[in-house]
Image (cartoon, rainbow, N blue to C red):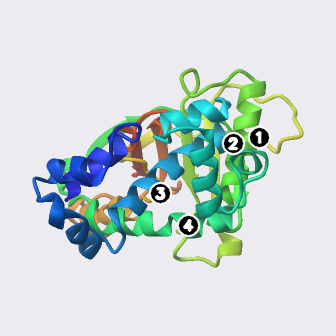
Amino acid sequence: MRRVLDHVDANLDADLGTEALAAVAAFSPFHFHRQFAELFGISVHRYVQLARIERASLALAYRTDPVLDIALDSGFGGPEAFARAFRQRIGQSPSEFRAGPEWAPWNAALAPLAQARSQHMTPTYTDADVTIVDFPATPVALIEHRGDPGAIGDTIRRFIDWRRANALPPKKSATFNIFHNDPDGVPPAEYRLDIACAVSRVAPNHAGVAEGLIPAGRCAMMRIAGPGDDLRAPAHFLYADWLPRSGEEPRDFPMFVQRVRFFPDVPAGEALTDLFLPLV
């Protein structure tokens, strides 16, 4: 069944009907939909629809592609079907969401999708997945998100707008997130994360973007395939399993990631994130 989830995420614009997905799973189409629902707690139709809406909503929020192109690329037959499904699940029209996303309903609507993936798409990590690297000193432009992790989308949008205005797309300037604390370990109001990109100088601005530095030093690195929106499992492995066995000590700088390839620019399964744990 994990093969089915991978197939859906990689082929959102293809035929993802019950018969097609039953063939991917090598199950009888007469029983596949019931088996899927029992295993994942969500119908196959709803899973596919939510996966398409997830991709479309991220493209609406963070990209400038026309709404029609986003609808077709996400597997919807046309703008009417897209608008109807989007409003039904998210509570906003696509154009309303693009203008001002309401993240709380969005998070609630996509929660069944995240739950199904976390139960059945979380890999098992081993020490072989960890590499010790020498990370170079990297000057960055950064914007701080402080507060509810569920509202981080608005901070991302402000940073993307600043990057566009300064001609710093991800292909030109590497993208980083710096995790100052664990979202599960602090109240939502105290959560802090920096969103950053590599650049040597930041001009004065009204966007709240400041200069920063990711210092040089040894790091334990793990390359994570997939959207990279929930890094609890690899972070837990590094701290709870790898670090005690390795004899290494963490350095006085937070865990951070480099976003190598982004969803929705690539299918979810093709996204790549490098996770770094600074070491003494």
Q: Crowdedness of circle 4 by 10 Å Cα count: few (<14), some, many (20+)?
A: some
Of the numbered discs 1 and 4, the one sitting upstream in the chain is 4
Q: CA distance from mark 2 to mark 1?
A: 5 Å
Residue 166, by quadrant, is top right
Of the numbered discs 2 and 4, the one sitting upstream in the chain is 4
Q: Crowdedness of circle 2 by 10 Å Cα count: few (<14), some, many (20+)?
A: many
Amino acid type shown at disc 3: Leu
Q: Crowdedness of circle 3 by 10 Å Cα count: few (<14), some, many (20+)?
A: many
Q: Nearer the viewer, mark 3 or mark 2?
A: 3
Q: Nearer the viewer, mark 1 or mark 4?
A: 4
Amino acid type shown at disc 1: Ala
**Mark 2 vs 4: CB contact within 8 A:** no
- Where does label 2 land, which residue? 142
**Mark 2 vs 1: CB contact within 8 A:** yes
Q: CA distance from mark 3 to mark 1?
A: 36 Å
> Where residue 54 is drawn, which disc sits there?
none
Q: CA distance from mark 2 to mark 4?
A: 30 Å
Q: CA distance from mark 3 to mark 2?
A: 31 Å
Q: Secondary structure under badge 4? A: helix
Amino acid type shown at disc 4: Ala
- Where does label 4 land, which residue? 109
Q: CA distance from mark 1 to mark 4?
A: 34 Å
Give x and y (percent) for residue 219.
38, 46
Q: Secondary structure under badge 1? A: strand
